Amino acid sequence: MTDGTTWLAAPRSIAFGGYHVVLARGLTPEELADRLAENVDDMPCIAVPAGEHTGDSLEELLDEVLNDTFGDRTGIGLRLGRTGDWAHAVAYGAWQGEFGSPEPVSRGDVHACLLEYEEEKGKPVPPRFEYARDGRLLGAFNLHLDATWGYEGVTGDPATGTRLQDLLTAAGLPDPEPDHREVHRTALGVIERFLSLSLPRSQIVDGTLPAVILEPAWSPRRPSRGHQRALSLHANNCGAEGWHSPASPTSLSLLLPRAARGPGRRFSDECEPFGT
């Protein structure tokens, strides 16, 4: 039995501040991390492997490494996994408002699904869903189906939108007297069934998963202190089962900024695939 996705509707289901989860079919978790690093809005980033982490330990690493390196910039980390055909990346740190749409992530006939909720934001922004394939947005709506936030049905590709809207209607949504948490949970269930999604709750909430930190793709002659710290963690954790190949001069060079490690080299180039 799988965990599905409806558990995300619980208060602080993953961490304080809400959740940002991207799932992709057609990519390994490592490739997904690389594409998300490129999809940071304010500046292109690289994914720096940081070993196995719980959510709490990754937050601590972000505080230790990136606050030390960038001052008041908290930074972003991702924990990575796979369930069935779908790779997933769960964001930690200062992810709010930092990522672009999933359309670029979905290039090359990849399916990409974004589930996001800025739960602790002062202004009560509803959770949202976006689904893209091959660089095109196929379906999107806010998961409270809240008309005051512009909900007028599922946007995107008309055929996909119609199918999703029919499923929402069959589930009793939108509800004229909505309880936002119940609407959130029900809408997640519709998406879960439509795309056959599942996220392993106990592993994400309580377990350890391979992690990366996202750092700006600068091009200095030597790595930043954050890169050096992550490099040390990489060397200490590279033997973890299901992570990546043992450290070598080639794989460690991937922790350098993009220009320092040569064109076209990515974290995923030196990683072995996760097990299914």
Image (cartoon, rainbow, N blue to C red):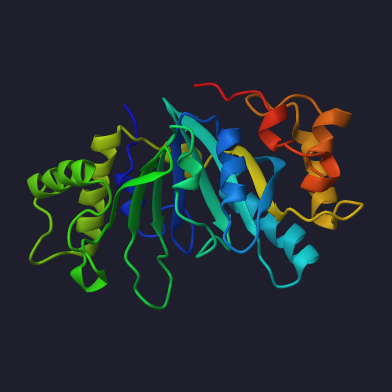
Residue 68 sits above or below residue 9 on the image? below
Q: Position of residue 253 (x, y in %)?
A: 84, 37
Q: Position of residue 93 (x, y in %)?
A: 59, 60
Please give left or right for residue 185 compared with residue 96 in the image: left
Please give left or right for residue 52 compared with residue 119 in the image: right
Which residue corresponds to the image point at 20% horizontal and 46% vertical from the top-left?
158
Residue 192 sits above or below residue 69 on the image? above
Which residue corresponds to the image point at 51% horizontal and 47% vertical from the top-left?
90
Which residue corresponds to the image point at 45% horizontal and 54% vertical from the top-left?
101
Closer to the camera, 207 or 98? 98
Image quadrant in which you'd find residue 121 = bottom left
**In which quadrant is the N terminus drawn?**
top left
State the count of labels: 0
Q: Position of residue 70 (x, y in %)?
A: 76, 67
Image quadrant in which you'd find residue 249 = top right
Image quadrant in which you'd find residue 110 = top left
Residue that sits furthest to the bottom in the current view: 122
Please give left or right for residue 185 compared with residue 250 in the image: left
Please give left or right for residue 211 compared with residue 198 in the image: right
Q: Position of residue 232 (x, y in %)?
A: 84, 42
